[in-house]
């Protein structure tokens, strides 16, 4: 949204001028989304991401403080752009085996997302498995099954559910011909995930 993007621009300018509260505000707004999108793209669960949390945070901080202009026209696409930038650094670090945790004053813990994966993907609980699994157990199962999906399916779910992008924004981010194409891709991905989950039941 335009208001969100305007707020980001305001916070960016303040953070680059040394305002730590503004930087904290940017972290609070973008870190959970960016981390979740990166995790889906590199094929990691939230538990595995704990090992590289500090790397993601450090890279996001550097990206925000070094950014001179916004390379996106919506808040969702800006989060996608950040995730792409951070993903490249994370992949490089993992390849080089340099993803060890490091401490320091700059480390910020990730806040929990407001909605769980199960609530976001299956709001009506149309999963047979949801009748026997609850809470964290169900969330961990969903994350494991997400890793069994193809990369494009993981990508569209990450952008829609974790990134909060509209179908128009997803189409732009993934190079799809239309928002309807993005919608269809998401529904297919969700349907395939539901099949995998119900087989687990």
Image (spheres, grey):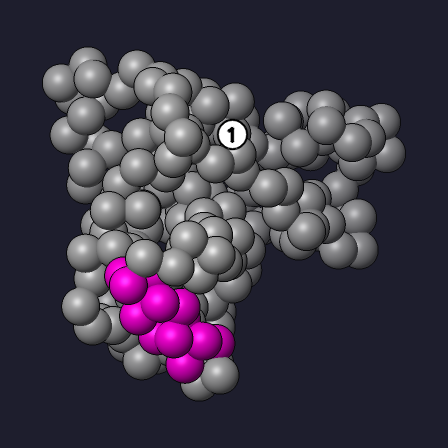
- Horizontal side of 98 relative to 32 (left or right) equals left
| Residue located at (35% from left, 67% from top) | 14
**Number of residues whose C-alpha sits closer than 10 Å to that of mark 1, classed few (under 14), some (14–19) or many (20 or more):** some
| Pick the front one: 68 or 22 | 22
**Would residue 16 be counted in the magenta stretch?**
yes
- Horizontal side of 139 relative to 19 (left or right) equals right
Region rendered in magenta: 4-17
How many numbered tags mark residues here?
A: 1
| Residue located at (80% from left, 27% from top) | 133
| Pick the front one: 128 or 94 | 94
**Would residue 134 be counted in the magenta stretch?**
no
Residue at the bottom extreme of this rendering:
2
Quadrant containing the C terminus is top right
In the rendered view, would you say 2 is above or below 144?
below
In the rendered view, would you say 155 is above or below 43?
below
Residue 125 % position (x, y): 79, 48
- Horizontal side of 12 relative to 96 (left or right) equals right
- Horizontal side of 164 relative to 85 (left or right) equals right
**Does residue 81 appear in this view?**
no
| Residue located at (63% from left, 41% from top) | 112
| Residue located at (52% from left, 34% from top) | 109
Residue 158 % position (x, y): 45, 50
Label 1: which secondary element: helix
Residue 11 % position (x, y): 40, 68
**Does residue 34 appear in this view?**
yes
Report the magenta stretch's main SS.
Answer: helix
| Quadrant of residue 168 within the rendered picture | bottom left
| Pick the front one: 77 or 2 | 2
Residue 184 % position (x, y): 47, 67
In the rendered view, would you say 151 is above or below 173?
above
Q: Which residue is mark 1?
A: 46
Residue at the right extreme of this rendering:
131
């Amino acid at each position: 949204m335009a208001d969100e993007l305007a707020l980001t621009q305001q916070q960016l300018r303040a953070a680059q001028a040394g305002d730590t509260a503004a930087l904290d505000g940017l972290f609070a707004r973008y870190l959970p989304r960016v981390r979740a999108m990166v995790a889906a793209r590199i094929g990691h669960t939230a538990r595995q991401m704990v090992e590289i949390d500090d790397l993601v945070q450090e890279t996001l901080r550097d990206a925000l403080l070094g950014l001179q202009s916004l390379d996106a026209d919506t808040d969702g696409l800006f989060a996608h752009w950040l995730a792409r930038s951070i993903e490249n650094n994370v992949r490089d670090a993992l390849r080089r085996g340099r993803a060890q945790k490091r401490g320091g004053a700059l480390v910020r813990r990730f806040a929990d997302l407001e909605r769980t994966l199960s609530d976001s993907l299956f709001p009506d609980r149309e999963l047979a498995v949801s009748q026997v699994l609850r809470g964290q157990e169900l969330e961990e199962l969903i994350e494991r099954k997400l890793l069994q999906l193809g990369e494009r399916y993981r990508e569209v779910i990450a952008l829609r559910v974790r990134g909060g992008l509209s179908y128009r924004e997803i189409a732009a981010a993934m190079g799809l011909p239309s928002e309807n194409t993005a919608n269809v891709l998401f529904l297919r991905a969700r349907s395939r995930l539901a099949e995998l989950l119900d087989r687990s039941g």
